[in-house]
Amino acid sequence: MSYNIFKIIREGLRGNKGWKKTWRNPNIKKKYDVIIIGGGGHGLATAFYLAKEFNIKNIAVLEKNWIGGGNVGRNTTIIRSNYLLNENEAFYEFSLRLWESLEKQINYNAMVSQRGVLNIFHSDAQKDSFIRRGNSMIINGADAELYDVNKIKSIYPFLDYENSRFPIKGGLYQKRGGTVRHDAVAWGYAHAADKLGVDIIQNCEVNNFKFKSGACLGVETNKGFIKANKVGCAVAGSTSLLLSKADMTLPIESHVLQAFVSESIKPIIPGVITFGAGHFYISQSDKGGLVFGGDIDGYNSYAQRGNLDTLEDVCESGLALMPTISKARLLRMWGGIMDMSMDGSPIIDKTHIKGLYMNAGWCYGGFKATPASGWCFAHLIAKNYSHSLSENFKLDRFKNGYMIDEKGQGAQPNLH
Amino acid sequence: MIINHPLLGPRDLNEFIYYGDASLLKRPKWDDKNAEDKFYKYLYLRKNIAGIHKELWFHQQGDRSWLVVTRNTKNHEIIKVELATEVVKGLDKQYEQNK
């Protein structure tokens, strides 16, 4: 099924009774050319680009729960490409460009909204480092503007500019950044991949791999053995668990990241704002809820929920930046399991087993990376060598000393 | 989460700083034959267990002691809390015995 304005009008007049399922519920074949484990954003995007750009048709995506129930439905929906290091910036800028054309590609309204991302700074030293980052963005073809206080005041008059501890000195603005409806990304990629013949199998959990003489023959699932020429893992926080079946120990810790939504209020925040003196980011959804988040809780966790002290910390940061939201009541909160890597950057690579590929280590930057991650992972699986934009995201960089450590924190996953 | 400190009793989570897997207590010897490989594994690789996990916590806002906490990473239930110094003494003993 494809979506267009005439269908919307027709269905509007007919009580919306003629819509068909967005994707099929296919029977599992005995054998696939490629199996992608994980029906999140990255897995579905990988399957879509494999089918569309790399002309592989016999593909299955195996999801242990339902599509979009993991991290792709558990984030703060921000897209941006404002990194310092070239390895990251070039990749995320490619991702942002894919976001810009995404809806046409997948024929699905993902509500891509380039409403602008503003990173606020609070000191002269921070201003210098933000200018440096902005220059790096521009060098890599992204957009970046330096905003002074007056310009910020014209958009966000209610911020606490005279805060005695953290006065606002300006901001780094990326106009092309913004938000995307996160669930619709999963549904849209599933819709588009399905249309190209990809089998999306829900409630199908992979328990083990089958190996023979150093090659992967397929996967053991709760619905039986499925044969495959190539298997790609895109399972975020569960990567260490899944790849331990292939005797791999990874430079990854799984941590819980919480996100929060307030009750709906009238529109006050037109874009995305980040606080420079703590870790806090906020935007307002089209329904009116303030969507915000901060740091990960900071300890290993596979529970999709966190503790209250992180909530307190995030809210304190928020109120330091914009005291006006103090009256807004919290409506919902949730946690997702992040695959925090040792340098804060992702891993898109082959493994020591022939035909087994991994895509992990997204820390809490996974959502904005979805299209580029899918594209580069599809390239790797189809051609058996890395895409030029992901060739630095190799697993052996930790052994060879080529870490991509955006913040310079060292091997301390809860600080990235 | 409340961490039941062996000396100070139950203390709130936000008094502590998390440092990671307690395997970090077993630092490789610098003059080991495979020191390079061992330090790579020590510094970067983690078992990342889903379930019972031994981990290091630092009581920064309290008595500044290091603790080894045994905790279930699936539901955050804390099973055991020990002083890291005591655990290290045990490790040293093991090391001497294996020598």
Image (cartoon, coloured by chain):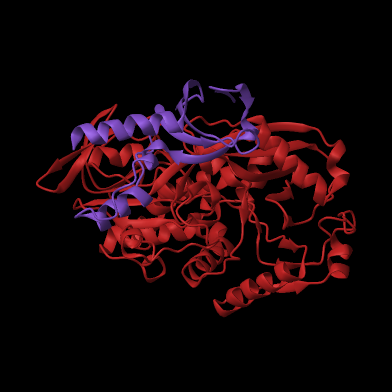
Camera-side residue of B51 and B83: B83
Quadrant of the image containing the N terminus of chain B? top right
x 50%, y 21%: residue:
B77
Quadrant of the image containing the C terminus of chain B? top left
Q: How many labels sit on residues?
A: 0
In this image, A270 relative to B56: left or right? right
In this image, A329 relative to A50: left or right? right
x 21%, y 54%: residue:
B34
Say whether residue A22 is visible. no
Q: Position of residue A13 (x, y in %)?
A: 69, 39
Q: Position of residue A172 (x, y in %)?
A: 72, 68
Q: Position of residue B39 (x, y in %)?
A: 31, 53
Q: Residue furthest left?
A: A213
x 28%, y 39%: residue:
A244
In this image, A360 relative to A73: left or right? left
x 63%, y 56%: residue:
A112
Camera-side residue of B24 and A53: B24
Camera-side residue of B64 and A167: B64
In this image, A71 relative to A387: left or right? right
Please give the letter of the chain rendered in purple: B
Drawing shade for chain A: red
Examine the image and state in which quarter residue A205 appears.
top left
Examine the image and state in which quarter residue A161 appears.
bottom right
Measured along the vertical axis of the image, is residue A301 above or below residue B45?
Answer: above
